[in-house]
Amino acid sequence: AQSVTQPDIHITVSEGASLELRCNYSYGATPYLFWYVQSPGQGLQLLLKYFSGDTLVQGIKGFEAEFKRSQSSFNLRKPSVHWSDAAEYFCAVGPGTNDYKLSFGAGTTVTVRA
Amino acid sequence: NAGVTQTPKFRILKIGQSMTLQCTQDMNHNYMYWYRQDPGMGLKLIYYSVGAGITDKGEVPNGYNVSRSTTEDFPLRLELAAPSQTSVYFCASTPRGPEQYFGPGTRLTVT
């Protein structure tokens, strides 16, 4: 069964600084990979996804993520964070089977200080 | 399209009561999912459905039931509510692929 690990429970970053959120997955083949963002009191919004092809994927809100097969990682990055990026971020993995189920990491909470 | 809608947004239940969380999608998606979200635990899959009339258990199904009589609706039933079911519940759907679309959630407290 697949699993997802987000090693950082909470990250604090200054506005304008860069941000990197880590995600490691366990799965035998190349899975489908996702990053979702959840603002306080809101549902989950898809930031970006990786299915195949170019290992550097661009998403919404200026985010990007890089798939590294050798490290089983799919880290999320943003060059310059804005106060509105304060949220909880979830990495998810799906094996691409016919039921399209996803497994989610525990999440990383990002705090942005002025 | 309204996307995935969930009602109610908030609910407080007493121990032993029952209730149904509603989920409706207007995108004609075949696949629907129910998750619960607990602090520091991410999202755990409760039940899912690959089409009308077909449902299956996820990772944490105990204490819950579902039905799928139409493509649009996928209600989640809590029988004999317990404090351990205090959580935020999310419904999601997908047409045929791993990218899921989420509803806004229902925050449930059982006291």
Image: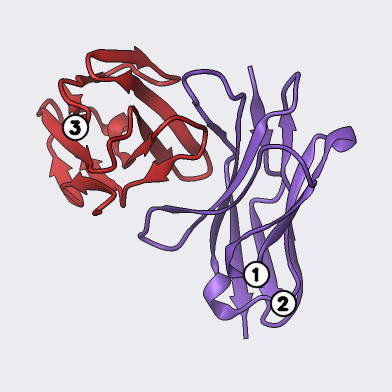
Q: CA distance from mark 1 to mark 2?
A: 9 Å
- Is A87 situated above or below B95? below
- Residue at (30% x, 20% y) in the render: B51
- Residue at (17% x, 37% y) in the render: B22
Q: Colour of chain A?
A: purple
Image quarter where the N terminus of chain A lies is top right
Q: Colour of chain B?
A: red
CB of mark 1 within 8 Å of CB of mark 2?
A: yes
- Residue A80's disc number: 2
- Residue at (84% x, 35% y) in the render: A69
The amino acid type of the residue labelled 3 equals Asp
- Residue A62's disc number: 1
Closer to the chain start, of discs 1 and 2, is 1
- Is A2 situated above or below B102? above
- Chain letter for mark 1, please: A
Q: Element under label 2?
A: loop
Left or right, residue A19 beside residue B61: right
- Residue B73's disc number: 3
Q: Are there few (<14), some (14-19), or many (20+) residues within 10 Å of tag 1?
A: few
